[in-house]
């Protein structure tokens, strides 16, 4: 590979692969276990917002913001590892999903329609 | 912007911003709501694995693999949107977390130690 | 057993035991799988509330209320089955937890204190 | 009330009502917030099982079993509170759901059929 700056998602995939291999931790990383771990990290993120009115930045103090930042990172790292085990290219999958969403919910037809959003 | 290939996470952030703006859907996207939506998407992912032994690729048929691929995309898209509202650079946050994990769990000390993994 | 009206949680435990046994479905019911299934059902409940302001009854139409009712039931049924596998008496555990909460958060000290609630 | 032994679910509902009222905490207990809190407690339960093979009792030490017991209680307590806000009689809803499941999955037809289970 000659590209000096690989895409972030590819770089993170490679970093997590090396990290797990160096610690002999791949044995724990079945897709099933990674999906569970992902759900646990997301709940730690949800926990920061559960009693707030909207979760807007001014409702969180510095310590909470830092916590949210770390949980967001944890979610991305488990997501990258699960996608890797599933042979899914996250970048392509997300771009494809955006195209599908665009076709399914044409802006002109759904604009500001809460019911359409609810189906989304 | 002159860079011809913006990073994927930045590109997805821009795509989701435009998508929501064109549909007037930002009104639904409080951080609290996005965190909930993220947790719902993750559960749809978990659902694919809940009765499987390990979730390895050969345990999933083509239809299930496609489902997993779409759910992985949905999780990434909500994650990108939540990070955007939180003013968090997902790339930097994930790289920082990997460095922290490396310091906290030196390979030489934790290799193959399931109890260390459990604390992780 | 001579008691004509067994406690609901005991009755539900017995019903779920019979239901699974008659279908030979206990093989799928490891505690790990039941915990995953429980999290999936809770997310289906969360999904009803994710874009609503507060989820108060008047924000839900009849169809949504019925959906919520069924999801609440599903959550309870998986919870009862997981507790059964864990040899946990849900009734005793919940009563004990209420006592612990009462000691940890004396009403006189925490009344209306959002920060105390946040620790809770 | 003259009944000396109210049903557990009713008793827990009354206990949680009093507990919240004495602390002026009902203000936090919108259905939306309770649904989020419920999902967070379930994730704390899932966390105990995520790296275990099956979660069978002999895979958990005494400390973990106690943790599971407390999380099961927390899940039940939030479930009871959410059902209360939704005017749902959990007992009736669960019994109704068991009847519906019985009709949808007749034992004679689905016995030991993993695919049928997967649809369930």
Image (tube, coloured by chain):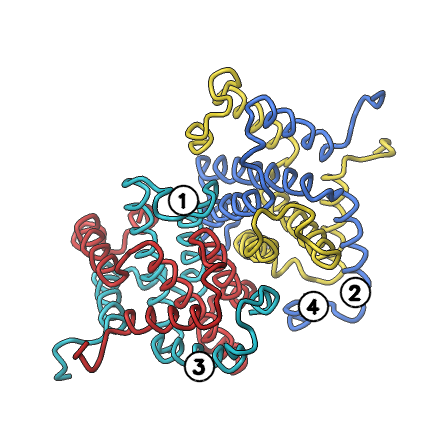
Chain colours: A cyan, B red, C yellow, D blue
Are discs 3 and 4 both within one chain? Answer: no
Of helix, strand and loop, which one carries label 3? Answer: helix
Residue at 64% across, 45% down: C56
Q: Which residue is mark 3?
A: A99
Are discs 1 and 4 both within one chain? Answer: no
Q: Are marks 1 and 4 in contact (CB under 8 Å)?
A: no
Q: Which residue is mark 2?
A: D107
Please provide percent x and percent y for residue C51: 55, 56
- The count of marks equals 4
Residue at 39% across, 53% down: A41
Of helix, strand and loop, which one carries label 2? Answer: helix
Neighbourhood count class around disc 1 (C-alpha, 10 Å): few under 14, some 14–19, many 20 upward:
some
Disc 1: host chain: A
Residue at 48% across, 57% down: B39
Neighbourhood count class around disc 4 (C-alpha, 10 Å): few under 14, some 14–19, many 20 upward:
some
Disc 2: host chain: D
Q: Quadrant of residue C67?
A: bottom right
Please provide percent x and percent y for residue C71: 67, 54
User: Of A83 and C113, which appears nearest the observer?
Assistant: C113
């Amino acid at each position: 590979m000659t590209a000096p700056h690989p895409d972030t998602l590819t770089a993170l995939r490679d970093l997590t692969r090396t990290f797990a291999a160096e610690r002999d931790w791949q044995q724990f990383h079945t897709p099933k276990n990674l999906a569970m771990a992902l759900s646990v990290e997301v709940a730690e993120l949800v926990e920061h917002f559960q009693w707030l009115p909207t979760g807007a930045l001014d409702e969180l103090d510095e310590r909470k913001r830092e916590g949210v930042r770390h949980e967001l990172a944890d979610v991305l790292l488990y997501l990258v590892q699960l996608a890797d085990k599933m042979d899914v290219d996250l970048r392509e999958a997300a771009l494809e999903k955006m195209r599908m969403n665009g076709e399914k919910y044409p802006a002109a037809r759904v604009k500001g329609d809460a019911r359409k959003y609810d189906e989304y």
